[in-house]
Image (cartoon, rainbow, N blue to C red):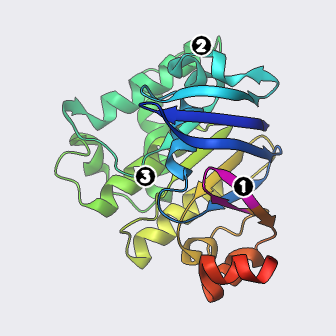
Amino acid sequence: MLLIRGLCAEIDGKPILRGIDLEVPDGEIHAVMGPNGAGKSTLAHVLAGREGYQVTGGSARFDGTDLLALEPEARASAGVFLAFQYPVELPGVGNANFLRTALNAQRRARGEAELDAVQFLRHVRSELKRLAMADEMLKRDVNVGFSGGEKKRNEILQMAVLRPKLAILDETDSGLDIDALRIVADGVNALREPGFSALVITHYQRLLDHIVPDRVHILADGRITLSGDADLARRLEAAGYAGLAAEVA
């Protein structure tokens, strides 16, 4: 699904990623953990094609395609989804129109028929019900006046509606209470099947209690320094980054 080799990137001439090697097979969920400033969010933004990040070396292939050669909208149409750490507000843009426009843009890119208003509402309401979100959410502008938890749940609603092949969650659990955390986790787990993979970037083991990853990777100083199974996150929770580094040294 996703194959990264020697990926290097910088911001304003400052190197952030210093040779990332990472593989996320089809149907697997991988977690990336690491201290502040390690490059976790930079990795997410580079994969999504966000402006301001300069790739200086290495490669990233998605379903056999050179991901880095695609424009951001082409990456989205190919099935890459990014849930932001800090979702932006879009005043004047209704949630329902935003979701329908995004979904139909991707369907057009794949050569599929667009959904009319009735078909879309049927689809989105089924996802709202599954995520325990009210229909009222569709009548509001995107993220405007939303609490932190509502913004994160809205990101998960977008993911559920768009059904990406690869979801990148950039600290989506940040600031969530336990109920919102479970909704986020349930949204990811509901998509867990062959044809769907996820890269979950998080600081906290608590999210991984609900989304049990196939692999956990520790990112430090712009590189993957250690990988292991789900137990690695529990060891990190107990020992901290310094303790874990000493443990494996």
Residue at the spot 60% in from the left edge and 42% down from the top edge: 17
Residue 29 picture location, percent across and down:
72, 56
Task: Look at the image and tell me in which quarter the C terminus lies.
Answer: bottom right
Q: Nearer the viewer, residue 49 or 21?
A: 21
Q: Is residue 67 covered in magenta?
A: no
Q: Earlier in the sequence, mark 2 or mark 3?
A: 2
The alpha-carbon separation of the residues under discs 3 and 1 comes to 36 Å
- Say which mark, if any, is on residue 128: 3
Residue in front for this viewpoint, 118 or 153: 153
Foreground label between 2 and 1: 1
Q: Which mark is residue 109?
A: 2
Please state the horizontal and vertical placement of residue 37, each as a whole percent of the image.
48, 56
- Left or right relative to 172: residue 23: right
Q: Mark 1 points at which residue?
A: 224
Which kind of residue does numbered mark 2 sit on? Answer: Ala
Residue drawn at 37 percent across, 58 percent down? 133
Label 2 residue SS: helix
| Vertical side of 169 occupied by 91: above or below | above
The answer to whether one can see residue 18 in this image is yes
**Amino acid bearing label 3:** Leu
Assign a secondary structure to mark 1: strand
Q: Choose the circle earlier in sequence order: 3 or 1.
A: 3
207, above or below 37, in the image: below
